[in-house]
Amino acid sequence: MLDKESPVPMYVQIEEYLKLRMKQGEFSVGTAIPSERELTEMFEVSRMTVRQSITNLVTEGLLYREKGRGTFVAAPKVEQPLSGLTSFTEDMLSRGMEPGTQLISLKKVIAEDDIAQALQLMEGEQVFAVKRIRYADHKPMAIERSYLPVKIVPELDLDAVEGSLYSFIEHQKELSISHALQSMEATLVNKEDAEFLQISVPAAVIVIERVSFLTGEMPFEIVRSTYRADRYKFISEIRR
């Protein structure tokens, strides 16, 4: 099935074969692909060549591995535009997906120096520290660590943090959200977040830090979110 006279490397041809089978629905989401041994025999190539093909498809987010079980077809990544200020809940609803939240912790603490600086707080001021796992269609997508000044939102209950904090701010607190500053970087997941996100170590994740402001340039939240790189990708439109 491979053209061994082609200048296209064998591992690339195997990748294209597997992609085609997935596109045609022969390998559906959640099903296992043939093992490395089976693919090696099928294509009459080395196991290293097959492994490189599979590793590349895992990196692309098209496949995922489960230790001791095999390699499976991944669900399509969620695309997140980098324009517009929306909450996770709003993003998932707009895609017809069911958003979900698991609260890990909610506590009132003295803001650490970097948090206080981002939120323009004085030394010793308190923030609500919220840690949540965010789900789409019951699958973990991100772990969020949010910090909100107690002086702006003195009451923060379970109903607020188990849904959309933006909705709570705008509708229950009747405050106007204006804009946000956001940074993004890729890194390797740590052990704690890997457990929350149900992924194996090592794995790539996307870390986003966002400071959100009310009208009048008052920061009301800083959130540090760790997204599964195999389930999420960010897109933007760039004009000249």
Image (cartoon, rainbow, N blue to C red):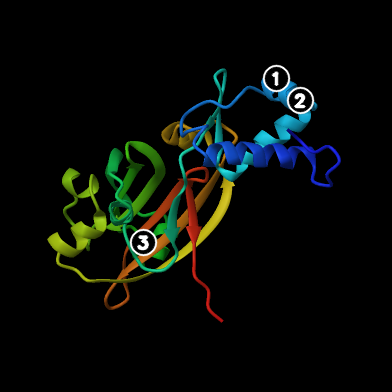
Q: Which residue is at 46% across, 39% downward?
A: 75
Where on the picture, by quarter, is residue 196? top left
The residue carrying mark 3 is 123
Q: Position of residue 107 (x, y in %)?
A: 27, 44
On the picture, is 236 further left or further right than 94? right
Q: Which residue is at 84% across, 47% downward?
A: 7
- Of the two numbered discs 3 and 2 in the rendering, the one whose residue sits closer to the viewer: 2
- 3D distance between C-alphas at marks 1 and 2: 7 Å
Q: Where is residue 102 in the image (x, y as percent from the top left)?
A: 29, 38
The kind of residue tagged 1 is Arg
Name the disc covering residue 47, or none: 2
- 3D distance between C-alphas at marks 3 and 1: 61 Å
Q: Contact (CB < 8 A) between labels 3 and 2?
A: no
Where on the picture, by quarter, is residue 59? top right
Q: Which residue is at 86% across, 41% downward?
A: 5
Residue positioned most to the bottom: 240
The kind of residue tagged 3 is Glu
Which one is earlier in the sequence, the residue at label 1 or at label 2?
1
